């Protein structure tokens, strides 16, 4: 088929084929023209068209790309800083804040809990077109692009509140066009997915206000010491002002910052008026409120020790990490009762001698039958010294171990409260011989009483009140040292106790907290409860909700403990713990003083509360120093300073607490054999003449008190069958 010719109505300038390259036109006598000359301006029009079509295509592709990006982009996981909230520890009431433990100080709040002017002030400061925009501001975007083209950076200006929220929550602060592009797309998408109210709420809870505060709730507390729901219009305008640059607007930082804040505050309020959110007449009456002075919150003071114990328990029991606690937004209710904790701190501060700053004291107070630690004093300031005197320090227990032997002897079936024993001193027992000692007295098994005192025949309560070493040596022989050690462990002592005859005199080193728990076991009628500090803990995100279940078990018969408590009441009624009589209620306990007065104790309880107090004096290199001629005391024994601190605490701690009496003694082992005859003195030793016999009045109201030197008994170094270590405080 022949090729179709060109229609005559459309003139042809040339025909296809190479033969036309140089021929004449044959028309009108026009001279031959080159190809370029013949085409004239047509190539320019084609390039222009191509440019326009190319630009259009690029625009279409860009729009398609944007559309695809918008359709496919997903909200990323919020970054750690955006989701972090302060973990708050409360006192036992669940309302009063004890301390915050967090790297990020944030506490979220719902917008419907806030007055409207809080959000309006923020919008007046940052984004007055918020309700009219679709997540981004076209004018702002254009301004930002122009600045970027000029080389001013990709993130200059143009950010709406929605964009700021997206950047703070999902993105980084990188100053790149890629990050800005993501920010714009996410902002548009979030504006479609969330209500304006929700976006504003999220923004208020994530923005940084300075003073370590993330979110409006913590900012309100940091600047005005109140909840965000209670902010006034004027205060809201201050907080809306400082977010632009806390270091530039916080008046605490200087006069320039104050001047800057005043100008910005005025701008915010005037903006609220212009937007119809604030009455102009009301605006004229307003004065800028001054934020309070602020210092960074740290685990300082006495509460710092509590926080560390609470964190440790959360990690051990709930397997939380430090990061979980610091960034977890936990609501933690402790067992610490603020009135009792305040009383403990005050008792130490007002009772301990001011001229003996090197004296250290530990105090722990526990609910019997439950284990809740309601008060604890570990030191004056955790920020200065992290060593906790209630849980880290280990001191020889001294005569505070005698109740363990007492309970063991009652458990053995060999001892009845009415049994009497020879309290003469010194006495010699084969079981107490120490062949390796360089002292003849020890090699012969000698045991002496405190102050070389000597007593006649005493029953068990009287021997307990007078802390008679020679009688308690006999009780440990009857009970066996192993049963004494096992009993102490049953009652809550976790530290190692050697099964030697000297353990009755408290040669083992123990913590204040574990002694408080052990004595609480007596108060609870033989129910041992593991001490704990966390009543409940829950996370904001609902990942867990923990409520403590006290670990309580009956370890010793209640009748045995009733007898032990009865004997220990004598210590307060007419023994070395007489200071505690001022409480005007039944108290049972035991004093203790170690060799060379290197540690002193008073551990005692009422039916509802058990408290241990231990005092020691560490040297500059960690060595143990004697507590003689210190703080106005010739010697510090359990019946002096520890008993005073205990009483000063327990008085206020027991305010409003019902006065309860202990159970009547059961007098277990009524058929117990009488004790063996007292051992004969070693011929090489001379037995001193016995002192007048001291016996207990059968009436619980007996008040006759022996001298402190006779009633207070240290751990006698020469009396034990193995070398006795000195009171120790392990760093």
Image (cartoon, helix red, strand yellow):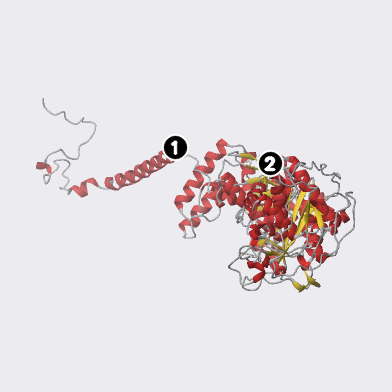
Q: In the displayed image of the protein, which residue is found farthest to the front?
A: 683
Q: In the displayed image of the protein, which residue is found farthest to the left?
A: 19
Q: Are marks 1 and 2 in contact (CB under 8 Å)?
A: no
Classify mark 1: residues with Cα within 10 Å, few (<14), some (14-19) or many (20+): few
Classify mark 2: residues with Cα within 10 Å, few (<14), some (14-19) or many (20+): some
Residue shown at 84% from the left, 56% from the top: 580
- Asked whether, in this view, residue 472 is left or right of residue 1, the answer is right
Cα–Cα span, label 1 and label 2: 30 Å
Quadrant in the picture for residue 61: top left
Give how far across and how far down residue 58 sits, in percent.
37, 43
Query: What numbered label is drawn on residue 72?
Result: 1
Residues 547 and 507: in front is: 507
Residue shown at 86% from the left, 63% from the top: 692
Residues 416 and 63: in front is: 416
Question: Does residue 721 sit above or below 55 in this rendering?
Answer: below
- Can residue 532 be seen by looking at this rendering? no
Circle nearer the N terminus (1, 2): 1
- The residue at which mark 2 appears reads as 111
Residues 485 and 122: in front is: 485
- Image quadrant containing the C terminus: bottom right
Question: Does residue 425 sit above or below 547 in this rendering?
Answer: below
Quadrant in the picture for residue 305: bottom right
Give how far across and how far down residue 138 sits, in percent.
54, 46
- Can residue 65 be seen by looking at this rendering? yes
Label 1, secondary structure: give it. Answer: helix
Give how far across and how far down residue 579 sits, in percent.
85, 59
Question: Does residue 478 sit above or below 3 in this rendering?
Answer: below
Label 2, secondary structure: give it. Answer: helix
- Image quadrant containing the N terminus: top left
Question: Does residue 169 sit above or below 443 in this rendering?
Answer: above
Q: Nearer the viewer, mark 1 or mark 2?
A: 2
């Amino acid at each position: 088929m022949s090729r179709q010719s060109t229609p005559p109505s459309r003139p042809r300038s040339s025909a296809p084929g190479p033969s036309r390259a140089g021929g004449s036109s044959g028309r009108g006598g026009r001279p031959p023209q080159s190809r370029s000359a013949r085409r004239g301006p047509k190539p320019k029009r084609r390039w222009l068209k191509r440019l326009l079509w190319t630009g259009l295509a690029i625009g279409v592709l860009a729009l398609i790309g944007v559309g695809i990006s918008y359709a496919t982009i997903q909200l990323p996981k919020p970054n750690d800083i955006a989701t972090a909230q302060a973990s708050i520890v409360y006192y036992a009431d669940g309302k009063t804040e004890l301390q915050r433990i967090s790297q990020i100080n944030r506490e979220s709040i719902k917008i419907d809990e806030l007055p409207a002017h809080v959000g309006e002030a923020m919008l007046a400061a940052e984004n007055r077109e918020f309700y009219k925009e679709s997540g981004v501001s076209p004018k702002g975007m254009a301004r930002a692009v122009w600045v970027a083209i000029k080389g001013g950076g990709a993130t200059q200006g143009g950010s709406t509140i929605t964009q700021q929220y997206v950047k703070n929550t999902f993105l980084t602060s990188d100053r790149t066009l890629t990050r800005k592009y993501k920010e714009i797309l996410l902002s548009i998408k979030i504006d479609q997915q969330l209500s304006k109210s929700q976006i504003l709420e999220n923004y208020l809870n994530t923005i940084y206000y300075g003073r370590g505060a993330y979110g409006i709730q913590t900012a309100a507390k940091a600047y005005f010491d109140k909840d965000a729901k209670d902010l006034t219009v004027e205060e809201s305008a201050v907080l809306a002002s400082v977010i632009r640059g806390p270091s530039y607007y916080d008046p605490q930082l200087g006069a320039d910052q104050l001047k800057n804040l005043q100008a910005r505050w005025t701008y915010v309020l005037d903006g609220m008026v212009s937007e119809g959110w604030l009455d102009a007449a009301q605006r004229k009456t307003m004065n800028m409120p001054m934020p309070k002075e602020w210092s960074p919150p740290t685990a300082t003071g006495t509460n710092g020790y509590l926080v560390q114990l609470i964190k440790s328990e959360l990690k051990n029991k709930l397997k939380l990490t430090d990061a979980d606690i610091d960034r977890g937004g936990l609501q933690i209710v402790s067992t610490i009762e603020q009135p009792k904790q305040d009383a403990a701190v005050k008792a130490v501060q007002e009772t301990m001698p001011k001229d003996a700053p090197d004296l250290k004291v530990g105090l722990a107070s526990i609910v019997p039958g439950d284990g809740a630690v309601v008060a604890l004093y570990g030191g004056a300031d955790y920020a200065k010294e992290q060593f906790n005197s209630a849980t880290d320090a280990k001191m020889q227990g001294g005569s505070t171990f005698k109740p363990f032997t007492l309970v063991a002897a009652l458990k053995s079936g060999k001892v009845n409260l009415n049994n009497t024993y020879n309290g003469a001193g010194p006495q010699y027992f084969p079981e107490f011989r120490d062949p390796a000692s360089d002292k003849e007295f020890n090699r012969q098994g000698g045991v002496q009483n405190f102050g070389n005192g000597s007593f006649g025949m005493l029953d068990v309560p009287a021997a307990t009140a007078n802390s008679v070493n020679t009688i308690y040596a006999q009780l440990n022989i009857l009970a066996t040292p192993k049963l004494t050690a096992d009993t102490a462990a049953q009652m809550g002592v976790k530290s190692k106790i050697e099964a030697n005859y000297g353990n009755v005199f408290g040669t083992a080193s123990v913590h204040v907290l574990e002694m408080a728990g052990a004595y609480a076991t007596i108060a609870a009628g033989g129910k041992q409860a593991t001490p704990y500090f966390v009543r409940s803990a829950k996370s904001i995100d609902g990942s867990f909700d923990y409520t403590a279940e006290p670990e309580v078990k009956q370890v010793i018969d209640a009748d045995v403990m009733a007898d032990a408590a009865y004997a220990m009441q004598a210590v307060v009624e007419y023994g070395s713990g007489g200071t505690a009589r001022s409480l005007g209620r039944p108290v049972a306990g035991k004093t203790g003083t170690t060799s060379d007065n290197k540690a002193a104790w008073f551990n005692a309880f009422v039916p509802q509360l058990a408290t241990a107090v231990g005092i020691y004096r560490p040297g500059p290199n960690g060595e143990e120093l004697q507590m003689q001629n210190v703080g106005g005391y010739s010697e510090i024994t359990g019946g002096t300073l520890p008993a005073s601190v205990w009483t000063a605490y327990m008085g206020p701690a027991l305010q409003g607490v019902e006065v309860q009496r202990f159970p009547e003694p059961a007098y277990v082992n009524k058929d117990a054999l009488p004790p063996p005859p007292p051992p004969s003195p070693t011929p090489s030793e001379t037995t001193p003449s016995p002192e007048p016999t001291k016996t207990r009045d059968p009436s619980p109201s007996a008040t006759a008190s022996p001298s402190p030197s006779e009633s207070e008994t240290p751990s006698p170094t020469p009396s034990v069958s193995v070398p006795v270590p000195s009171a120790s405080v392990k760093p």
